[in-house]
Image (cartoon, rainbow, N blue to C red):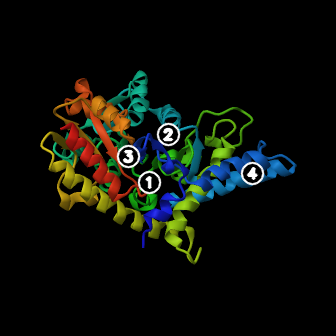
Amino acid sequence: MFDVASVRAQFPALSQSVGDQPMAFLDAPGGTQVPRRVIDAISGYLTTSNANVHGAFLTSQRTDAVVETAHAAMGDLLGCTPEEIVFGPNMTTLTFGLSRALARDWGTGDEVLTTWAEHDANVAPWQALEERGVRIQQVEINPADCMVDLDDLARKLSPRTRLVAVGYASNAVGTIHPVAEIARMAHSYGALVFVDAVHYAPHRLINVAALDCDFLACSAYKFFGPHIGVLYGKRRHLASYRPDKVRPATEALPYRWETGTQNHECLAGVTEAVEYLADLGRGPRGPVTTRREALGTAFALIERHESALAERLLTGLLRIKDVRVYGITNPARLHERTATFGIRLESVTPNEAATHLGSSGICAWSGNFYALSLTERLGIEEHGGLLRLGLVHYNTAEEVDRVLRELASIA
């Protein structure tokens, strides 16, 4: 059973109000709220363990344990070994660093494919390689559902393709892309596959082995943790490609990819965020399964709860004549989207709608959310982009009904 009231009690931020209105956080695609245990883990590290690594004294030894534990936790969350997990300031910085490392031997005539559905953190790092003569192509999407056009991908793949970069799910409209099939197609040409899973990570369990991707990036602050980036890389790639690093830094995996001193307090928070998710699948009897198995149970519960909320929100949005919903709108295809909806109202701009909702205590984003290629391809960038409503497992049916009432009043 999924007890949303028990979940919400663990998030201090959810008890806030605007005037006499309780705050409703539908802003999760821009960053989720965090449970108390994550906050305590960060504070606890700074209180008792604050030091740099590999020292011959207690606080440094505690820090070594924090670092090791965080790699193991993220390995369980993504389905890989701890040695295949790299931490960094954020997904964007990690991707820029990775693009430089991968392209050391690329040059004129080599190609990178990305798509029109991407967050720009999965576009700009590859476009930066154009100065080396690398050609960047963007794969088309189906405007009706914002799904990657696999036929266009097949047309653009060639022996010159060095890498295909694709988002697991759109942070603007929620569409989930067939990443495993894209990886299969890319590998048939000998190309590497990089997956931006930042938006997908809080909604569904990731299995990098099943995807057979070469690299995958996500951000802990999108799955109830602190602001820190995470990169998965197949072990053989992390061992063979050469990252930028200072000379005294180790060559050991995965630390050769972790530039400088890491954010140790946030690593403590990452572990606790993963443990929070695992506990949703363990139930009151505690850790009766492995952490990975518990995470599988947890995300099954999360998906069921979020799907019910998504269906409720989608049904209500389609009943408001003034509203256009972008992405997948067929209720039978809810399994192909996250509970994130990009919409426009005919009567007001997205920013005006977000401002109205904010004054009522409802948090929602407006604009392009860095998914600039998508809003340009949909022809709405110059018109203010989208109003985005994003649900996660701490949201409730009552909050969905509340936002629908507000949107109907605007319309």
Q: Secondary structure at mark 2?
A: helix
Q: Point out which mark residue 64 bears.
A: 4
Q: Secondary structure at mark 3?
A: loop
Q: Point out which mark residue 26 bears.
A: 3
The picture places residue 409, in percent across and down from the top left corner, at 21, 40
N-term mark: 3 or 4:
3
* Amino acid at circle 1: Pro
The picture places residue 264, in percent across and down from the top left corner, at 68, 45
Q: Residue at x 67, y 52 (%)?
A: 41
Q: Label 3, label 1: how many angstroms apart (C-alpha)?
A: 14 Å
Crowding at dot 4, Cα within 10 Å, few <14 / some 14-19 / many 20+, comes out as some
Residue nearer the viewer, 174 or 194: 174
Q: Secondary structure at mark 4?
A: helix
Q: Point out which mark residue 202 bears.
A: 1
* Amino acid at circle 4: Asp
Q: Secondary structure at mark 1?
A: loop
Q: Quadrant of residue 369?
A: top left
Residue nearer the viewer, 389 or 335: 389
Q: Residue at x 74, y 45 (%)?
A: 46
N-term mark: 3 or 1:
3
For label 2, the residue is: 91
